[in-house]
Image (cartoon, helix red, strand yellow):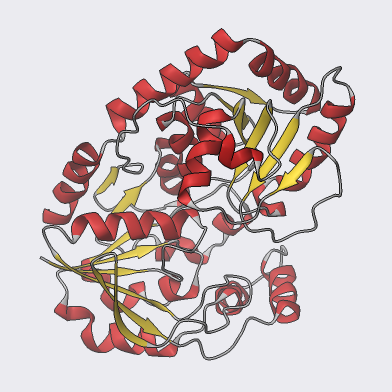
Amino acid sequence: MRIACVVHRYGPDIAGGSESHCRQIAEHLAASHDVTVLTTCAKDHVTWKNVYPAGESLSGGVRVRRFATARQRSLSRFTEASEIAFSRSASEADQQQWFRENGPDAPGLLSYLATHGQEFDRVLFWAFRYAETYFGLPLVRDRAVLVPTVEDDPVIGFSVLRRFFSLPAGFVFLTPEEQALVIKRMSDCLAPSVVIGAGLDAVEETSASAAPLDALGVRRPFLLYLGRVDPNKGCEALLRHFVRFHDAQAEPVQLVLAGPANMPIPDHPQVLPLGFVDDATREALLAQAGCLVVPSRYESLSMVLLEGWNHRLAALVNGRCEVLKGQALRANGALYYRDYDEFAHSAARLLRDGELARQLGRQGWDYVNREYRWPHVLAKLEGLLAG
């Protein structure tokens, strides 16, 4: 089968949930299919500045065709478009303009889909909110499979999405909560769909050395945040909660942030921003953390949470996010909080009660082992693609 995977950014050095999901799916499908990734030359999702060279290359054994963005994102125009699109008086034209200003503006990619899209048996699109998906999917709707990565945020309320969600030939959802949210927004019947989550390989239980982390200034016990440090990921609230929590503790505790920062990070002696970390450091952090914290209010699936459970690490998640709460309850591998008091109580329990933390970590691992191993995930995906 000839398969195209369309995504706004692509590469092993990009920290993003939908981008990582696309890359992993593309690499695994390439073992038995002819897979081409169609993407942009951008590395930064804020500016869409061209960084990678345009044209064809190989990445992880997958053919990648990159198209230049015609312009960088104007934050002033995007802010203005957002204010209009999220207002009560917004027209459908206003909402479509939001997608244009959100970007990326990659006319070559859309032209390629219009000209060559019918040469593929299936065209998978990641993340409905980006322009290459919103404007590209209708060009190949008869063979399009949408991986929407829908979050319960204001964008899902756009009226133009009722028609857009009626276009794909199939859907791939990451959680039952995401699937339910799209069904709720649809006025017509949903196309064939499957809930696959994300695939993971088993990680052996190890007693990782603390030496690599000592050199970085990491001190146990510590709470671990993995991923983009961004207000949209709940990091402002996490930092406020942590500073207040730390000041109330008799013993010092660290918050380690491992990921690129898109916001100012307070200068606090127990807040350690590491930036983007290599795989060895990431593994050591997951092996030694007191617990993983996932503070986002908006998620379609937390791959970081699954990764933590794959390392038998207990988690503390934002209970105001239905997806995170649903994952926590299904796995019985995390505590969840809705305000500072619940955050502080839960964090203290996980740091002080080692047996509880180990039990939650084991239960999280059992859940991942049942639901998210690659053979199981790929079997469900292949069934949809063959239909």
133 with respect to 254 (left or right):
left
- Between 326 and 333, the one lying in front of the other is 333
Image x and y of residue 247, in percent: 89, 27
46 with respect to 125 (left or right):
right
Image x and y of residue 155, in percent: 59, 59
Tell me which residue sits at (51%, 32%) in the image.
209
Q: Is residue 301 visible?
A: no
- Between 382 and 248, the one lying in front of the other is 248
Tell me which residue sits at (51%, 84%) in the image.
105
User: Where, by quadrant of the figure, is residue 124 drawn?
Assistant: bottom left
When the figure is inspected, residue 306 is found, relative to residue 337, above or below; the finding is below
User: Where, by quadrant of the figure, is residue 221 drawn?
Assistant: top right
Image x and y of residue 268, in percent: 86, 43
When the figure is inspected, residue 160 is found, relative to residue 340, above or below; the finding is below
- Between 129 and 339, the one lying in front of the other is 339
Tell me which residue sits at (68%, 30%) in the image.
222
When the figure is inspected, residue 127 is found, relative to residue 293, above or below; the finding is below
294 with respect to 66 (left or right):
right
Image x and y of residue 148, in percent: 41, 56
When the figure is inspected, residue 60 is found, relative to residue 335, above or below; the finding is below
127 with respect to 35 (left or right):
right
Q: Is residue 313 visible?
A: yes
Tell me which residue sits at (45%, 53%) in the image.
149
